[in-house]
Amino acid sequence: VIFSATRITDGDFLQGVRYAGSCATTHSVVMRSTTGTVRFIKATHRLDLKPHYVARTCPVSFGR
């Protein structure tokens, strides 16, 4: 079994999506039951290179 998760908002286990200019940073976890491997992944996404349907402006900060 492989499990993966990416948070949208901040939580105790993972950070939520962060926006800066035309980039978004995500934090994810991937777990593999066979080997017990746990990987934390921090990815930067260039929103200016994504298809047109992806929002290119920062969303409301939700109280932060």
Image: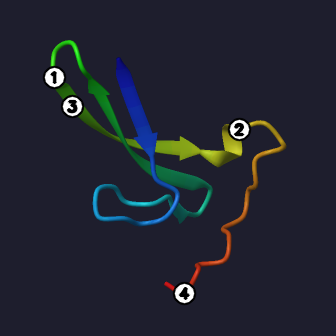
For label 2, the SS is loop
Is label 1 or label 4 in front?
A: 1
For label 3, the SS is strand
- Label 3, on which residue? 38
Q: Upstream in the sequence, badge 2 or badge 3?
A: 3
Is label 2 or label 3 in front?
A: 3
Q: Amino acid at mark 4?
A: Gly
Q: Amino acid at mark 2?
A: Lys
What is the spatial separation of the Cα atoms under label 3 and label 4, in whole angstroms? 31 Å
* Left or right position of 20 against 34: right
For label 4, the SS is loop
- Label 2, on which residue? 50
Q: Position of residue 35 (x, y in %)?
A: 16, 15
Residue lying at 66% horizontally and 68% vertically, measured from the top left: 58
Vertical relation: 27 (above or below) 16: above
What is the spatial separation of the Cα atoms under label 1 and label 4, in whole angstroms? 37 Å
Number of residues whose C-alpha sits closer than 10 Å to that of mark 4, classed few (under 14), some (14–19) or many (20 or more): few
Q: Position of residue 64 (x, y in %)?
A: 49, 84
* Left or right position of 53 against 44: right
Q: Quadrant of residue 2?
A: top left
- Label 1, on which residue? 36
In this figure, which colouring scheme has been used for the structure? rainbow
Label 1 close to label 2 by CB (< 8 Å): no
- Label 4, on which residue? 63
| Residue in front for this viewpoint, 42 or 20 | 42
Label 1 close to label 3 by CB (< 8 Å): yes
Q: Upstream in the sequence, badge 2 or badge 4?
A: 2
* Left or right position of 41 against 52: left
Residue lying at 62% horizontally and 56% vertically, measured from the top left: 22
What is the spatial separation of the Cα atoms under label 1 and label 3, in whole angstroms? 6 Å
